Image: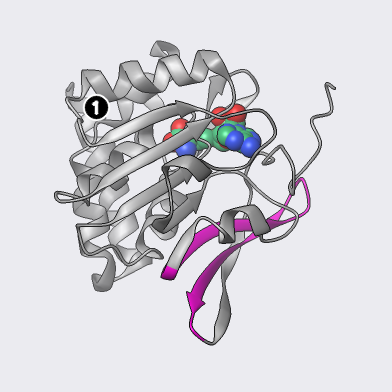
């Protein structure tokens, strides 16, 4: 890594540690182990450690590091869980989750075939073996055949909490997802308890839309 990138990286992690607090140390350590510059296009490499989302092609973005940290920490992972990510994009978020799961695994679904290929390549380049990228099946959300999961992280904004994803959560499971309109959302944590769903508001965010049944229609169709 060149010197400028290293300086930007130290600055970013100092900023994240300050805004997230001690409790999320494990998440930040996992993020420190994943070279974000390998998940962005060569022309954005110098911006890899700015706290901003970056274009990854096909109208999609790799999420802002702050949001990756917040959504990841919201899952309270212990290290041995089965975790689903919906919207693998570049594979960066899946790599961060995989780093937190020495005894668990990540299944990440993506609808755009070129991004499926990109995410697989990026994870492979980083030597991450406990994350699998699946091409999503039609309009069905998630990966019903690979579940149920202990935790689900949705990397795209939904109009509500999709029933299809709740159905893929184990009892006691947690899900972090952006809920709102197509432009702005609230990062939301949902916990499936024996007494029902507990929903918490974790703050404002902006994600690209989640497309499919129970989410937004694809405007190109
Ligand atoms: N987590 C990614 C960022 C993804 S952006 C990263 O770390 O790079 C959100 C992604 O969700 C886009 O790639 C988009 O194609 C995908 N997406 C949207 N709706 C989806 C669906 N129903 N199933 C799977 N992927 C979906």
Label 1 Cα neighbours within 10 Å, binned few <14 / some 14-19 / many ≥20: few
Q: Nearer the viewer, residue 58 or 173?
A: 173
Q: Quadrant of residue 76?
A: bottom left
Left or right: 86 in relation to 80: right
Q: Quadrant of the N terminus?
A: top left
| Colour theme | one colour
Quadrant for ligand 1?
A: top right
- Residue at the disc numbered 1: 4
Q: Position of residue 101 (x, y in %)?
A: 21, 50
Q: Quick check: 164 above or below 194?
A: above
**Front position in the image: 142 or 221:** 142
Residue 185 on the magenta segment: yes
**Which region is colored magenta?**
171-194
Residue sitting nearer the eye, 112 or 172: 172
Q: How many marks?
A: 1
Taking the spot 69% from the left edge, 51% from the top edge, the residue there is 158
Considering the whole magenta stretch, tell me its main secondary structure.
strand
Residue 186 coordinates in the image, percent (x, y): 64, 62
What residue is rendered at 45% in x and 28% in y? 134
Residue 6 is situated, as x and y percent measured from the top left of the image, at 20, 33
* Image location (x, y in percent) of residue 25: 21, 63
Q: Can see residue 23?
A: yes
Q: Is mark 1 within 8 Å of ligand 1?
A: no
Tell me where residue 142 sits by quadrant.
top right
Q: Residue at x 33, y 56 (%)?
A: 16
Q: Is residue 62 visible?
A: no
Q: Which image quarter is the C terminus in?
A: top right
Q: Is residue 161 magenta?
A: no
């Amino acid at each position: 890594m060149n010197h400028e990138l290293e300086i930007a990286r130290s600055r970013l992690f100092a900023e994240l540690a300050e805004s997230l607090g001690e409790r999320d140390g494990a998440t930040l350590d996992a993020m420190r182990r994943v070279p974000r510059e390998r998940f962005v296009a060569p022309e954005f490499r110098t911006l890899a450690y700015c706290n901003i989302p970056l274009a990854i092609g096909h109208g999609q973005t790799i999420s802002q590091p702050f949001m990756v940290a917040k959504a990841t920490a919201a899952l309270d992972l212990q290290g041995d869980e089965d975790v689903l990510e919906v919207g693998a994009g570049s594979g960066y978020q899946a790599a961060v989750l995989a780093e937190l799961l020495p005894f668990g695994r990540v299944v990440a679904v993506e609808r755009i075939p070129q991004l499926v290929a990109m995410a697989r390549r990026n994870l492979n380049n980083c030597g991450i073996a406990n994350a699998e990228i699946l091409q999503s099946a039609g309009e069905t959300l998630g990966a019903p055949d690979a579940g149920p999961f202990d935790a689900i992280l949705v990397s795209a904004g939904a109009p509500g909490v999709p029933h299809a994803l709740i159905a893929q959560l184990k009892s006691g499971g947690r899900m972090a997802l952006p809920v709102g309109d197509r432009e702005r959302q609230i990062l939301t944590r949902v916990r499936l308890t024996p007494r029902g769903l507990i929903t918490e508001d974790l703050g404002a965010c902006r994600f690209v839309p989640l497309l499919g049944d129970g989410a937004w229609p694809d405007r190109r169709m």
